[in-house]
């Protein structure tokens, strides 16, 4: 099983992470087929809550969920907002990478 450590290496194998602002989510696709998502809710202008993250079973254990989480919590939509995570995966990811919250301001 391939382990992905960067979006660039995932892209070489046909994976992409795209922000779909109108749907309030980041999607993980493989050659155009949706394979996962990180969904969020905007709480006014001051906060964002990541409330749901899922990756297809075939992609679990590959690092792709972590790449999806990383892109979501470091995206422009987060800047200047308090980050909340009612989703256990994002909450655990941020607990392992607290430095990412410092970039949101």
Image (tube, rainbow, N blue to C red):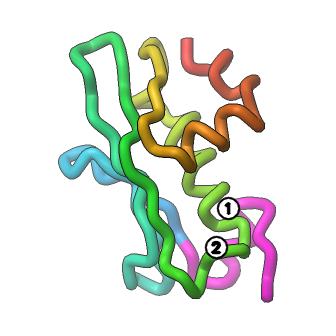
Residue located 55% across and 43% down the image: 90
Q: Is residue 43 above or below residue 63?
A: above
Q: Position of residue 50 (x, y in %)?
A: 41, 39
For label 1, count other residues whose C-alpha is less than 10 Å away and answer few (under 14), some (14-19) or many (20+): some
Q: Quadrant of the N terminus?
A: bottom right
Q: Is residue 77 above or below residue 93?
A: above
For label 2, count other residues whose C-alpha is less than 10 Å away and answer few (under 14), some (14-19) or many (20+): some
Alpha carbons under labels 1 and 2: distance apart: 6 Å
- Disc marking residue 7: 1
Q: Position of residue 46 (x, y in %)?
A: 33, 11
Quarter assignment of residue 81: top left
Q: Quadrant of the C terminus?
A: top right
Q: Secondary structure at mark 1?
A: helix
Q: Is residue 21 magenta?
A: no
Residue contact at pointers 1 and 2, CB within 8 angstroms: yes
Quarter assignment of residue 103: top right
Q: Position of residue 39 (x, y in %)?
A: 35, 49
Q: Is residue 40 above or below residue 61?
A: above
The residue at which mark 2 appears reads as 11
Looking at the rendered structure, the number of numbered marks drawn on it comes to 2
Q: Secondary structure at mark 2?
A: helix
Residue located 48% across and 23% down the image: 83
Q: Which residues are magenta?
A: 1-15
Residue located 45% across and 15% down the image: 82
Say left or right for 57 vs 5: left
Q: Position of residue 32 (x, y in %)?
A: 39, 82
- Disc marking residue 96: none
């Amino acid at each position: 099983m391939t382990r992905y450590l960067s979006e660039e290496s995932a892209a070489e194998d046909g994976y992409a992470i795209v922000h779909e602002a109108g749907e309030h989510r980041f999607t993980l696709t493989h050659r155009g087929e949706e394979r996962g998502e990180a969904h969020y809710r905007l709480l006014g202008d001051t906060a964002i809550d990541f409330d749901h993250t899922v990756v297809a079973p075939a992609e679990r254990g590959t690092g792709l969920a972590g790449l999806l989480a990383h892109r979501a919590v470091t995206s422009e939509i987060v800047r200047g907002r308090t980050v909340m995570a009612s989703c256990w995966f994002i909450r655990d990811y941020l607990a392992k990478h607290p430095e990412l919250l410092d970039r949101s301001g």
